[in-house]
Image (cartoon, grey):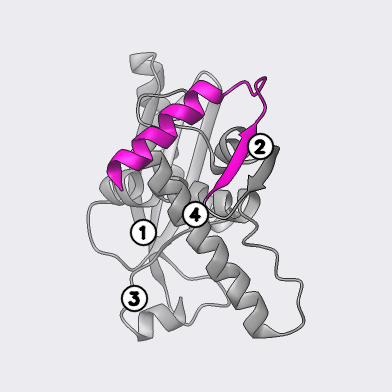
Amino acid sequence: MNFCDEHDIGYIIGIGKNPRLRKKSESLSKMAQYRFKALNEKVRLFGEFQYGAGSWKYERRIIARTECSDEGISSRFLVTNITGNSQDLYENLYCARGEAENRIKAQQMDLFADRTSCTKWFPNQFRILLSGLAYILMEAIRRLSLANTELASATCGTIRLKLLKIGAVVTRNTRRVKLLLSSTYPFQNLFRKVSCRLLSDS
């Protein structure tokens, strides 16, 4: 956060709850409980205040989100240096990180971006670049060929497993290479449709 502040880089980061944060947001929690009892429906309120942890150089802006429902009261705290409405920053900026995290997780878990087992930097960097290229290709296949199919919203791992990871016999002569796929392959109709779409877009 110090680096971001010094270089004019915006951030919005979740921070752990502690007694001081709960104390500063106590009035917000009481208001949420009061409104929940009055309306008998889930209530979500936002507030903000200045707070400085012991390890921070100075106080920073904290956004507090408090919800009250039948399940009780729940609070979430963010630290940010970005100006704007608290609720808008929480709902439209901070919560949007979930989709980005899903994309990162897909590259790490499905396309092996976390496989950096070499002791040297450049081979590991090259592996990450290859994983990034694989992700771009997967997204291109999804965009160009998988719209309105059963794999339209599938993960990279599912696309790789069902559409690409197929056993085949390879034959070749001087003029052509043939891939002989199994006649019992369960996704052959989808494979044919995807292949035709890719050929028509190329």
CB under 8 Å between discs 4 and 3? no
| Residue visible at 47% across and 48% down in the picture | 138
Q: Which residue is mark 4?
A: 135
Give how far apart the Cα atoms at labels 4 and 2 are.
Answer: 19 Å
Would residue 99 appear left or right of 155 to someone viewing this image? left
Would residue 78 appear left or right of 104 to someone viewing this image? left
Instruction: Indicate yes or no whether the magenta region holds residue 196.
Output: yes
Q: Amino acid at mark 1?
A: Phe
Q: Amino acid at mark 2?
A: Ile
| Residue visible at 62% across and 70% down in the picture | 127
Q: Amino acid at mark 4?
A: Tyr
* Disc 4 versus disc 2: nearer the observer: 2
Q: Amino acid at mark 3?
A: Ile
Q: Which residue is mark 3?
A: 9
Give the residue at the far top of this rendering.
Answer: 40
Q: Which residue is mark 1?
A: 49
CB under 8 Å between discs 2 and 3? no
* Disc 4 versus disc 3: nearer the observer: 4
Q: Inspect this view and state whether residue 46 appears.
A: yes
